[in-house]
Image: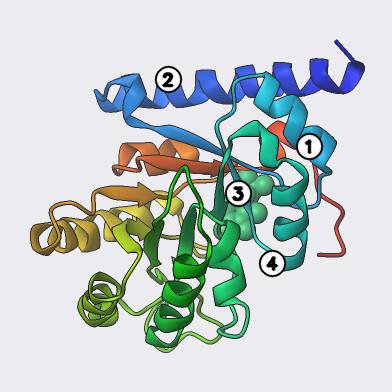
Amino acid sequence: MTARADVLAANLDVVRRRIAAACAEAGRPEDDVSLVVVTKFFPASDVRLLADLGVTDVGENRHQEAEDKAAECADLGLRWHFIGGLQSNKAAAVAAYADVVESVDRAKLVAPLSRGAHSRGHPRSPEVDVLLQVSLDPPGAGNRSGADPADLADLARRVEEAGMLRLRGLMAVAPLGEDPDVAFARLADVRESFVRDHPEATTLSAGMSGDLEAAVRRGATHVRVGSAVLGERPTFQ
Ligand SMILES: *Cc1c(COP(=O)(O)O)cnc(C)c1O
């Protein structure tokens, strides 16, 4: 193995053990929680090494970078998760390569996502899985990303009515400056009532390098882990 492959293998091992330990502590089976490795800012060569190490799901947050990497790595059969802020004029293009769009937070995105999904002609997975990103910020906070919990029902209905999109669940990021366990406890409540109305939409994407244990404790089915696997990203982002 190359030196880089050794580093990624060792980091992955640590992250997988953390997930397993968090599952054990929460009394959940280990295979309840899937790992999405967030490869933003890192090259396609790293994605290739990760695929060799058994990674099946990768996450990206910027359209151009994601599109290029997905094309470069098309032979690997990975599932591509789009996890970043989504502009409505890019949404159709994102739905052409992303298998899961995790950051749907407003109605305006639904029609272009559906249009992009129709055009993708993806033999392996024709439909695009959709998660609604829910904001855990206090109401009225500036710069929120994610839908207000009160708007989820309407957004879910629009996704369900659109063609080629499959509503799979919710995604959230813990707000800075708050104990993630407290934020994810709020998320668990939101999710409980959401799943009552949408029994198929059981995915909960929550937890990153710094707070995956709290997310698993509060019911996450997918954790999105970047720096703990790939190392620190450049700080200019
Ligand atoms: C970058 C990013 C992650 C990964 O963050 P790390 O702290 O590097 O694990 C997870 N979720 C979203 C939405 C991100 O943008």
Residue for badge 3: 59
Q: Are marks 4 and 1 in contact (CB under 8 Å)?
A: no
- Neighbour class for label 2 at 10 Å: few (<14), some, many (≥20)? some
Sequence-first tag of 3 and 1:
3
Identify the residue at the far top of this view. 1
Q: Position of residue 110 (x, y in %)?
A: 40, 79
Question: What residue is drawn where x is 81% and y is 15%?
Answer: 6
Residue for badge 1: 231
Viewer-nearest residue: 3 or 25: 3
Residue for badge 4: 63
**Real-space Cα distance between discs 3 and 4?**
11 Å
Mark 1 close to ligand 1, CB under 8 Å: no
Q: Position of residue 87 (x, y in %)?
A: 60, 81
**Real-space Cα distance between discs 2 and 4?**
34 Å
Q: Depth-wise, is mark 2 or mark 3 nearer the camera? A: 3
Find residue 21 and name its label. Answer: 2
- Neighbour class for label 3 at 10 Å: few (<14), some, many (≥20)? many
Question: What residue is drawn where x is 48% and y is 46%?
Answer: 123
